[in-house]
Amino acid sequence: MPVIQVKRLVRDFGPDRVLKGLDLTVEEGEIFGLIGPSGAGKSTLMRVLTGYLEPTEGEVAVFDRAPTTFVSADRRRIGFMPQSFVLYGGLSVRQNLNFVAGLYGLSFLRRRRRVRETLEFVELWDARRKTAARTSGGMQRRLQLAAAIVHEPALIFVDEPTANLDPILRRKFWDEFKLLRDNGHTIFVTTQYVGEAELCDRVGLLSNGRIIAAGTPDELRRQAFDGEVIELTLAGDPGHTGTQLEALENVGHVVEVREERDGDGPVSRARLVVDDADVVLPKVFETLNGADIRSADVLNPSFDEVFFRLVRNE
Amino acid sequence: MGALLRVRAVAAKEFWVLLRQPQLLLLLLAGPVLIMVAFALSFEVDRAKPRAVVVVEPGSEGEELFERFQDRFTVRTRFQGTVQSVEQADQMLRNDETDAAIILPPDPSESVRRGEQAVLEVRYSSINPIYGTTVPNRANGLVLDLNQALVREGIARELEDAGTAREAIEDLDRQLARVNEAAESLATPEAQAATSELDSTLAELEQTLEVLALVESGEGEEDVDRSLEQTRQAREQLAELQEAQEGGAPSVKDRIGLTELEQQVGLLQEQVSEIPFDVPPRVLANPFRLDLENLAPYEPDALGFYTPATLALLIQHIALSLASLAIVRERLSGAYELFEVSPLGLGELLVGKFLTYAGLVFGVNLAVAAVLVGTLEVQVLGGFLRLAVAMMLLTLASLAAGFLLSTLSRSQLQAIQIAMLMFIASGFFAGFLFPLDQLGQPARSFAYLLPATYGIQALQDVMIRGQWPAWTDFLGFALIFAISLAVARHLMGRKKV
């Protein structure tokens, strides 16, 4: 069941069109990653989805309601973690979270329980008495995440949570997102780290104000390469191996051939795009019968490469 | 219930955020108290008197005059002593060692004898159009005082020299009888001596009456004028008689005017008897005495008068400064976006902040009031309930204006600058420096946009007059409060379309 539905969304800032007819669907209980470079319009889209900005054109529905018409009950179903730390450095970690819990109308007892649970979840319980200004950048991000989930929202908007964090902390954040997802929350997360797409259930690739691709990470990968990729390494004279590779065109599409030398002499590395690697790989070995095959692997190209190809194709 | 929880959350957050800023709290709490104490301890009414030196030439009549009337010089000034030359006094003025140099003429009598006024020159050096008038005003007072003192002395001397007027009239009566007795032979030496003495007595009486005519006023003035007229007519008739004597008129039929003279002297006797010769010279010189009656219940000293206005300015400034940062700070930090996404209504945000700020500023107000009354012994005639109500109303109106300012400001610096401009504007236009009715338009209309304008009036009503603030002040507070908050709420609610 879709939690978010966006159709032909346009958002202008004066003469500048930032979102240019964007379509998007986010299903309940998934981590949806919106990936795109800086300035692509990720934060703008998130602000439209949270009701902070009005769309210029198009239809936006969150929980089947236009965000600009949200009432308190709708807002209580939403959590929001902004890009930067916007809480209060002068307050302690617990006071900050108490405040946000209060904004969502949590009663005293529930607030007390949830503040503790949430701080324990983000591993800040031990630092609860520290003033926020005296905590590290990573702790502040976790506190901000805690503020987004303290009221147990169904849908959590997270704007670039891992920007400028070290890889270990980034990983930790994603672990927490997965735990939240497993507990039934829907997470809409933006990031400029293309590699983090791998950690999402579904990904939307935002470029120049449009979603140029959307789907699971594997679907995007296939979309980028028009199928799955098998990487072969053949030893022997390049002229001979070239003839062998031509024979592979019957089972797939050779997209790239590189000739190199290793310790024993010349080798040729080739990438073969196929519909289904598991099905095609035995046929590859059959076609190359007699060839000196050093390796044949199903390639899992990095999302940087996927992203690059998708943007280039666009 | 949810709204109450959200308002409570905002109020508690604001409270703790403020409490965690000790420097701000110190400024907020101790600042106003220190300013009020410093103001109270340093404001000396006596300092309004100018410092003065008197320039006198040694051995001159001016020096004698100064010694005779020294108290007139010292009572109006912070008297620093005498100097002997104008140059020395000018140097002191240039060095700001004195505020005024009073130069006494060396020979004032000579000027008077020439029919000119003696000049008391006062030099001063001031660029202040308000307090710069202190020296001229006091110099005028000094000259008036000196003139009165001299006139008083003159009257006393004249009355003493002339003897009592009644004695003069009795002499006149006796002499007239002698003239009458000698009238059968006017040309005799006895008759001529008698008319001569009569003329001399009439001349003295005329002189005394002339002095009296100069200083007498009111009903007595008419008596003196009539007496003087009678005396002059009597002298004219006596002159005719003397002329007849000198012409050698030998008989009664030649006593031209003697009967008329007797009638004139009889009338004169009646007139002079009505003149109050037993009135002291002080009364003659100053027939009017000022009796002021202030219907205000309490006439404060300068400290008591300025305290309500200073308090009003401080309350407005603290409230306005705090509130002016309230919204712009949240907007710039990004927290505002968090609020917009949350169920927190903008009205709830305003109310939450309002409660904390109002409580805090009101607490500061009470502390300042306690210091004023407890240690500086400033009067609060209207009592603490009225004072608390007036301060709370001013606080609420100022906070509302501050919230409006905060929604209009694009940066914290801009908000602080505008708050400071409001403070300065209030100093000039709200009735602190100048009364409101001395302001022309459009400044006067602008003054009524400032909470401090109503605050100064309200606090003066409570603290000095001992009454509730005027309904117009209540209305002013209410309008500023309602309009500011409504506009602020409207501006905050505008979507970024």
Image (tube, grey):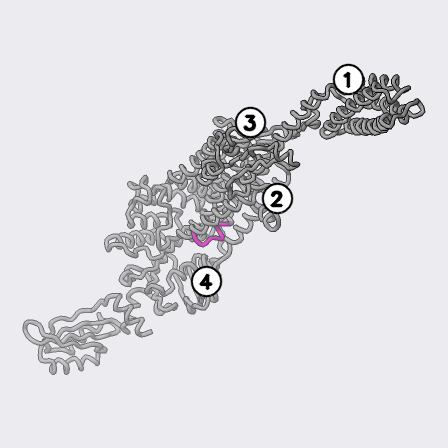
Q: Is residue B374 visible?
A: yes
Element under disc 2: helix
Give the amino acid at mark 2: Gln
- Same-chain check, marks 2 and 1: yes
In the rendered structure, which disc, 3 or 2, sits on the residue that comes first in sequence? 3
B374 left or right of A295 in image: right
Assign the N terminus of chain A to one quadrant of the image. bottom left
Q: Marks 1/3: CA distance?
A: 35 Å
For the record, the magenta segment spans: B405-412
Q: Marks 4/1: CA distance?
A: 119 Å
Give the amino acid at mark 4: Val
Q: Looking at the image, which is closer to me, A112 or B353? A: B353
Q: Tell me the tag on residue A60.
A: 4
| Chain bearing mark 2 | B
Q: Marks 3/2: CA distance?
A: 45 Å
* B409 falls in the magenta region: yes
Could you tell me what secondary structure mostly forms the magenta stretch? helix
Q: Marks 2/1: CA distance?
A: 59 Å
The residue that mark 2 highlights is B438
Q: Dot 1 surroundings within 10 Å: few (below 14), some, or many (20 or more)?
A: few
The residue that mark 1 highlights is B167
The residue that mark 3 highlights is B64
Element under disc 1: helix
Q: Quadrant of residue B135?
A: top right
Do the residues under discs 3 and 4 have CB atoms within 8 angstroms?
Answer: no
Q: Position of residue A165 (x, y in %)?
A: 27, 54
In the rendered structure, which disc, 1 or 3, sits on the residue that comes first in sequence? 3
Viewer-nearest of discs 2 and 1: 1
Give the amino acid at mark 3: Glu
Viewer-nearest of discs 3 and 4: 3
